[in-house]
Amino acid sequence: MAILEALLEQIAPGKTPVRHLAIGVHWTAVCSRGCGLASSLVGEGPHGHTPIRDVGQLHTWSAEELAGWVQSDNLLEASIGMAAINSLLDAPERGMQEINAAEIIARQSAGKNLAVIGHFPFVDRLRAATRNLWVIEKRPAEGDYPEQAAGLYLPQADVVAISGTTLINHTLEPLLALCPREAFVVLLGPSTPLSPLFFDYGVDLVSGAQVVDEAAAMLTIQQGAIFPQV
């Protein structure tokens, strides 16, 4: 997990207090220096069989300590860790733009082969404009391909869009290894840290989210909002 280790190394040592922490059905938020988000991922075992450590005391941990949980095999703990990382990282002062990643993906993939890791809401409207569109999902919907298909389709792709949740479930590095060197690779979604680190690993565009209204984000997340509602 070299990328995760490199991300953790970008965090300055310290004991930043956790001001708020919420684990919603769809999103997890940790508020320390800023408000960081991550998808709430849970394991596939029987309900209630994968407890989070130290429940009821998470607010007493520092954000830096929680950030280390991103390496946990417990997916919900890793979600907390990813949100903690996003709460601690400063967005780069240069090279940032307010964009819609879907528009850039559409422009880059017109008439080309597009592989998408994760069923994003925009995928259906891109089908007519691409030569081929392969959506690869752990829980495939109709028309999607299972995760085992990544080895077949990623090497054929001209454009690859990868969900930031792959950082949480620890699949990003093997997926990047399957991408052609010349492919345009996008890492996107609110779980994605806004860090130039990913450019060293073959990513061309990093698209994440910045929380500008912490109170509204926490309220909606606690009430089960999906991301457009947040």
Image: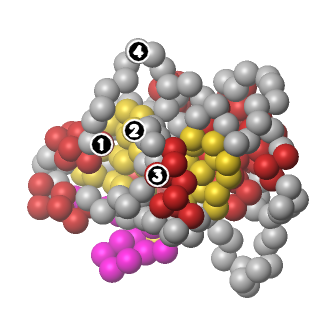
48 lies left or right of 94: right
Residue range in magenta is 132-145
224 lies left or right of 1: left
Q: Label 3 vs label 4: CA separation?
A: 27 Å
Q: Label 4 vs label 2: CA separation?
A: 14 Å
Question: Under tag 4, what secondary structure?
Answer: loop
Q: Reply yes or no: does residue 133 show up in magenta.
A: yes
Q: Quadrant of residue 47?
A: bottom right
- Mark 4 or 1: in front is 4
The spot of residue 75 in percent (x, y) is 69, 61
Residue at point 79% right, 23% down? 13
Decide which of tag 1 and tag 2 comes sooner along the chain. 1
Q: Quadrant of residue 101?
A: top left
**Label 1: how many Cα within 10 Å (few below 14, some 14–19, many 20+):** some
Decide which of tag 4 and tag 1 comes sooner along the chain. 4
Mark 3: amino acid: Ala
Question: Under tag 1, what secondary structure?
Answer: helix
Question: Does residue 118 appear anywhere in the picture?
Answer: no
The spot of residue 62 in percent (x, y) is 80, 38
Colour pattern of the rendering: secondary structure
145 lies left or right of 200: left
Q: Reply yes or no: does residue 99 show up in magenta.
A: no
Question: Does residue 219 appear anywhere in the picture?
Answer: yes
Mark 2: amino acid: Ser
Q: Label 2 vs label 3: CA separation?
A: 21 Å
Q: On the image, numbered disc 3 is attached to which residue?
A: 216
- For residue 94, the mark is 4
